[in-house]
Amino acid sequence: MSDFFYVIINGIPIKSECNSYLQIIDTTYKKF
């Protein structure tokens, strides 16, 4: 996956493209 993800942490969207980072917080992330 090379798509950009916006990880929502405490209501703050954080752009990230690291899959391992998304796996840690896969409970609150949205794909745009």
Image (cartoon, rainbow, N blue to C red):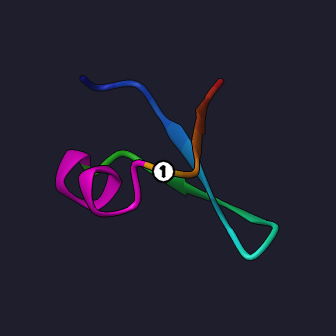
Q: Residues within 10 Å of mark 1 (few under 14, many from 20)?
A: few
Residue in the picture at 34% in, 51% down:
22
> Would residue 32 be found to the left or right of residue 24 on screen?
right
For badge 1, the amino acid type reads Thr
Residue 21 horizontal side relative to residue 5, left or right: left
Residue under label 1: 27
Question: Magenta includes 14?
Answer: no
Q: As displayed, is residue 13 above or below residue 31? A: below
Query: In the picture provided, is 16 more to the left or to the right than 30?
Result: left
Q: Magenta residues: mostly which secondary structure?
A: helix
Q: Position of residue 3 (x, y in %)?
A: 40, 25
Judged from this view, the residue extending furthest toward the left is 20
Residue 26 screen position, x and y as percent = 40, 48
Magenta residues (range): 19-26
Work out which quarter of the rendered image holds the N terminus and state it: top left
| Residue sticking out furthest to the front | 27
Q: Residue furthest bottom?
A: 10
At 28% from the left edge and 63% from the top edge, which residue is drawn? Answer: 24
Is 24 rendered above or below residue 16?
below
